[in-house]
Image: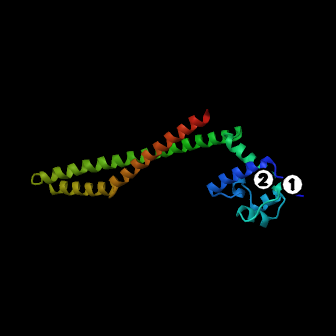
Amino acid sequence: MLKKPSKKCFGTKIALKKIMKAKETISTLLGLKQEQVAMLLQVSRSKWSMYELGLRSLPAASMEILAELLAIIETAEEINMQPSAEERKEHLATIEKQIKENIYQQRSIADKISALEIKQKALLRVSHLKQHYKDTGKNKAEYQKGLAEHFLAKAQNTAGKNSWSQQRQYEIKMKTLQQEEKFLREELEGFGK
């Protein structure tokens, strides 16, 4: 004679409807493979697979076990699972390390921007000198004009052809790093509580 399903089994049907709406298999919901769920329910893997597809029913005893498993999962999801003290400590240490790396990168980018600014200022100054010699060319010796052009060429070579573009890229990287630092500090403050 078949055993009458307990009230737990009817609760399982409600939980199963939620699963079907989410288009998630029960095995996935439990975090197990089909073979593992089948072993827990004491049925074959093929029987379990057919049940998940809605093509077969399970024995009452298996339904009760399934109801218990789903109740455990539902309870665990209702509880706002907090990380362990060790996990919190590791997470905080990781964030602090990321902040230090971020600050190092910001300093490095700031140094690069500063170096480019110095080169660009030098280029601008030499450019003014060349223009001065060009404007007053008749009174100045050819030697001085030639030197000014040579200095300008050298300054342009030192500054680089794309120094403005490179500086903009560094400035964008700096802003990105600053935003990242802000986010990391917010995470540190929020998680540290």
Give the image location of residue 39, x and y in percent: 82, 59
In this view, which residue lies farthest toward the left?
138
**Image check: 66 left or right of 29?**
right
Q: Is residue 181 left or right of residue 139?
A: right
Which quadrant holds the C terminus?
top right
Of the pair 139 and 27, the residue shown nearer to us: 27
Amino acid on which disc 2 is placed: Leu
Secondary structure found at label 2: helix
Q: Give the position of the N terminus as an image quadrant.
A: bottom right
Residue 104, numbered label: none
SS at mark 1 in the image: loop
**Residue 155 located left or right of residue 64:** left
* Residue at screen point 52% across, 44% down: 102
Type of residue at label 1? Lys
Q: Which residue is mark 2?
A: 66
Q: Which residue is mark 1?
A: 3
Q: Contact (CB < 8 A) between labels 2 and 1?
A: no
Q: Residue 171: x, y in percent?
A: 39, 47
Q: Residue at x 84, y 52 (%)?
A: 4
| Residue 106 showing in the rendered view | no
> Residue 63, percent across and down?
79, 54
User: How busy is the neighbourhood of tag 2: few (under 14 within 10 Å), some, or many (20 plus)?
Assistant: many
Query: For residue 26, which quarter of the picture?
Result: bottom right
Q: Earlier in the sequence, mark 2 or mark 1?
A: 1
Give the Cα distance between marks 2 and 1: 16 Å
Q: Is residue 191 left or right of residue 57?
A: left
Q: Residue at x 74, y 48 (%)?
A: 11
Counting every numbered tag in the picture gives 2
Q: Quadrant of residue 157?
A: bottom left
